[in-house]
Amino acid sequence: RIPLASAISAFFVAPIIAMVLAVLFLGEALTVRKIISLMLGFIGALIILRPSASMDPGIVLAISAGGFFGMYMIATRQASLESDPVKTLAFQCLVGVALLTPQALWKWSIPAAGELWLFVAMGTMSAACHFLSIVAFRYGQASILAPLVYLELLGGAAIGFLVFGDVPDAYVWIGALTIIVGGSMTLQRSRPM
């Protein structure tokens, strides 16, 4: 319904929502360093994506998706503190299957035999990424980890270059540097600002 850049930038309300919910529901401290990190990540994302100012129902859907992802981060943090990472991963996978199976059945088509390895690779990478996220949330505060979501843009730019030959422009480099600076602020263990 909307350009991908606009959808992604609207989705990136997730770290903001996660940081606010972490303060409200998990009792995490909101420091100046965390706020600056979040702002730099969001500004970097906007520099890379350069979204248009038009408002569309698709934007509302993308912001809603970001809101749910922010809640997912908080739920993952809470679950990781109370449950084994493997059990948490299994629960998330089962809930995902329950929610997505009806949609999959509606649009199902039998994949070609040569495509099956893609499904196995995607499932393996997805499970590994979710497991690592669960472990990260077990040891790190959600308000510290949330701004690191903006690193997805860097991975996307790298994949675009390696797979499709897309050469990042100056906006991507400036935005990436802004994201890296913002994300690295949450990783420093110096005295609070």
Image (spheres, rainbow, N blue to C red):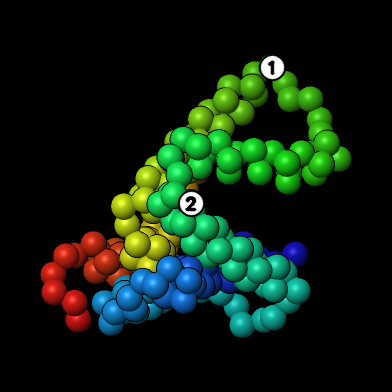
Work out which residue is located at the far right of the displayed protein and give it: 106
Neighbour tally class for label 2: few under 14, some 14-19, many 20 plus, Cα within 10 Å: some
Of the pair 29 and 180, the residue shown nearer to us: 29
Q: Which residue is depicted at the point 73% across and 76% down? A: 56
Q: Position of residue 54 (x, y in %)?
A: 67, 81
- Report the side of 158 relative to 52 (left or right): left
Please tell me which residue is depicted at 43% across the width and 40% down the height of the picture. Answer: 84
* Residue receiving disc 2: 79
Left or right of residue 85: residue 123: right
Q: Is any part of residue 52 visible from this angle? A: yes
Q: Image point 66% across, 69% down: which residue?
A: 64
In the image, is residue 13 above or below residue 117?
below
Which label sits on residue 113?
Answer: 1
- Quarter in which the N terminus is drawn: bottom right
Where's residue 120, x and y in %?
57, 25
Q: Nearer the viewer, residue 156 or 184?
A: 184
Q: Residue at x 81, y 41 (%)?
A: 102
Q: What's the mark number on residue 155? A: none
Describe the element under mark 2 as helix, strand or loop.
Answer: helix
Q: Mark 1: which secondary structure?
A: helix
Horizontal relation, residue 102 to residue 49: left or right: right
Residue 9: quadrant of the picture = bottom right
Q: Amino acid at mark 1?
A: Ala
